[in-house]
Image (tube, rainbow, N blue to C red):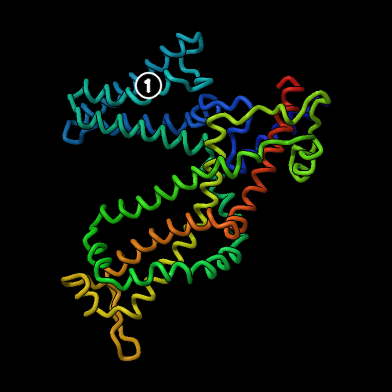
């Protein structure tokens, strides 16, 4: 009974890890068993839809029926052959999804496209789409992006007041650097010339550099959090978690807890990145709203036309206190460009200034410290119980 209770507690701890977006803290966490195997129904549905999507409505109905039957038959034959090689019933559901099943998912439909009609472009698009889908499933499930986002969103909701206070203190300094850019013709000309994907790529460049900066600082901020001198230090942190019910072996020491592996570091990095990213996103959106409002009040259509060097694209126009107020696509482009720049500046500033870093990052580090303590108890108890 004690072993059953311990196993149940370990399961509770593993669910606790998943709910906080750190499933790689689970012992023997496997992409084959824990990610793709659980995604098998969805992968099967996508594969069947791709097989049906190979039909051509310009063909006779009986040809389409034959192609559909042949495609589904080919899938069942391949499925049966794989099961036969593993000495399992022909149509049994795979107990694990490994390289063989993933290769079938990626290559079967493109191969049928080539055999049926030599549709090279369709086969290539399907191949790339399948690989991209597997990548999304792996990242989304293996690194628990949805639980991370939900957890980070809950923290952000609880910290709305702190974020607003941080914005109020940071906004004046930002305005000193950015407002004069907003009122220069060169910025309007550059932003207006960034049509379509060019503006998106330019804004994404600021985001990418900001992400690289945050990721580069993660080892500096998090490195010492995973080390504990005694179980007393650990017990003080796990009191309100499922790990409080675990009793590590008497001969174990938290100092011997295995170091984080590459995937576990990646998991921790995503947690920090998402929590900080959501906060920075909210602050950046507020700054963007400020720029749009400021532009509506200060930049007239004639002024924006002169700055852009040509006619502007009117989106909304109304009159306020006898003066025309115009929302143009150029104003939105300038506001978006400067918002991305301000978000990058804000990221660098809050992570390098000691006062802002303490307010902006301290709570995340405290919760990560608790997660490392839970991991230490979990791994020691799991090892002691033969898990």
| 54 displayed left or right of 262 | left
- As drawn, 3 above or below 164: above
**Disc 1 secondary structure class:** helix
Residue 260 position by quadrant: top right
Residue 344 position by quadrant: bottom left
Residue 159 position by quadrant: bottom right
| 259 displayed left or right of 296 | right
| 359 displayed left or right of 70 | right
Say which residue appears at 19% left-offset and 28% top-offset: 119
Say which residue appears at 30% left-offset and 26% top-offset: 109
- As drawn, 193 above or below 19: below
Question: Which image quarter holds the N terminus?
Answer: top right
Residue position marked by numbered label 1 in the rendering: 104
Q: Is residue 125 visible?
A: yes
**Foreground of the two, 332 or 262:** 262
| 247 displayed left or right of 62 | right
């Amino acid at each position: 009974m004690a072993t059953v209770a311990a196993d149940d507690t370990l399961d509770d701890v593993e669910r606790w890890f998943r709910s906080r977006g750190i499933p790689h803290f689970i012992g023997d966490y496997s992409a084959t068993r824990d990610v793709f195997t659980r995604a098998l129904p969805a992968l099967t549905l996508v594969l069947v839809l791709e097989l049906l999507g190979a039909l051509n409505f310009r063909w006779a109905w009986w040809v389409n029926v034959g192609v559909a039957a042949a495609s589904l038959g080919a899938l069942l034959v391949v499925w049966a052959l794989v099961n036969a090689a593993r000495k399992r019933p022909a149509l049994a559901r795979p107990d694990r999804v490994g390289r063989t099943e993933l290769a079938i998912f990626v290559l079967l439909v493109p191969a049928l496209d080539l055999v049926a009609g030599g549709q090279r472009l369709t086969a290539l698009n399907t191949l790339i789409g399948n690989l991209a889908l597997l990548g999304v499933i792996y990242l989304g499930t293996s690194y628990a992006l949805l639980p991370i986002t939900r957890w980070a969103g809950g923290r952000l909701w609880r910290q709305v007041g702190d974020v607003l206070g941080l914005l109020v203190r940071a906004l004046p300094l930002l305005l000193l650097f950015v407002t004069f850019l907003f009122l220069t013709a060169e910025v309007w000309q550059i932003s207006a010339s960034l049509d379509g994907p060019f503006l998106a790529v330019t804004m994404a460049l600021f985001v990418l550099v900001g992400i690289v900066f945050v990721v580069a600082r993660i080892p500096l901020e998090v490195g010492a959090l995973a080390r504990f001198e005694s179980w007393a230090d650990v017990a003080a942190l796990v009191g309100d978690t499922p790990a409080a019910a675990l009793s590590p072996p008497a001969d174990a020491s938290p100092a011997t807890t295995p170091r984080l592996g590459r995937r576990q570091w990646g998991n921790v990095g995503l947690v920090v990145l998402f929590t900080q990213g959501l906060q920075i996103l909210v602050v950046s959106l507020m700054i963007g709203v400020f720029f749009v409002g400021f532009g509506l009040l200060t930049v007239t259509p004639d002024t924006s036309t002169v700055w852009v060097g040509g006619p502007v694209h009117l989106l909304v126009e109304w009159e306020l206190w006898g003066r025309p107020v115009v929302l143009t696509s150029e104003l939105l482009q300038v506001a978006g460009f400067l918002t991305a720049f301000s978000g990058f500046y804000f990221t660098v500033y809050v992570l390098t200034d000691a006062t802002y870093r303490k307010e902006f990052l301290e709570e995340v580090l405290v919760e990560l410290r608790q997660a490392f303590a839970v991991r230490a108890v979990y791994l020691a108890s799991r090892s002691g119980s033969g898990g």
